[in-house]
Image (spheres, rainbow, N blue to C red):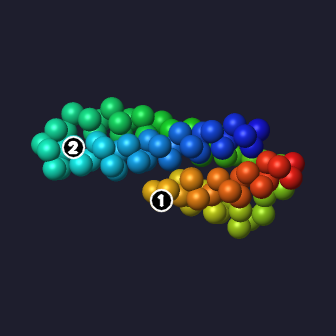
Amino acid sequence: MIRTFRYIGLLEGITTLALFLVAMPAKYWFGFPQLVPPVGLIHGVAFILYLLAMVICLWGRGFSGWEWARTTLAAFFPFGTFINDGLLKRKQVGA
């Protein structure tokens, strides 16, 4: 289950970068706002999926309170899910 969550975290991180590095610059620098709604929607769905999958995939897997907080906060910062992946990988190997 941790492996599944890691894939979802990767998806959430990629959609965050797509929104911040592709869609928003296209809107504000190049006057092309049409990318923001679809990319934003995809990112929003990925974000909600991340939070739901966190509870479903990680519950009962020996995560401390700090690890739960860190994994939750990772979704709120660019590159956060990528940085947190090392923790998830260690937990996956140890499981």
Percent from the top left, x then y, of residue 72?
A: 60, 56
Find numbered disc 1 in the image and state the secondary structure of the residue it sits on.
loop
Residue at left 65%, top 63%? 69
Considering every residue shown, the one lying at the far left of the view is 31
Quadrant placement of the N terminus: top right
Q: Is disc 1 surrounded by few (<14), some (14 to 19) or many (20+) residues within 10 Å?
A: few
Q: Is disc 2 surrounded by few (<14), some (14 to 19) or many (20+) residues within 10 Å?
A: some
Percent from the top left, x then y, of residue 48?
A: 53, 41
Does 64 sit left or right of 70 as displayed? right
- The quarter of the picture where residue 32 lies is top left
N-term mark: 1 or 2:
2
Q: Is residue 95 above or below residue 70?
A: above
What residue is pinned by disc 2? 26
Is residue 61 among what the camera can see?
no
Percent from the top left, x then y, of residue 21?
A: 33, 49
Residue at left 43%, top 47%? 16
Residue at left 48%, top 36%? 45
Considering every residue shown, the one lying at the far bottom of the view is 66
Is residue 66 among what the camera can see?
yes
Does 12 sit left or right of 7 as displayed? left
- Amino acid type of the residue that numbered disc 2 sits on in the rendered structure: Ala
Q: Nearer the viewer, residue 21 or 56?
A: 21
Residue 59 badge: none
- Amino acid type of the residue that numbered disc 1 sits on in the rendered structure: Phe
What residue is pinned by disc 1? 77
Question: Mark 1 and mark 2: span between their CA atoms?
Answer: 21 Å
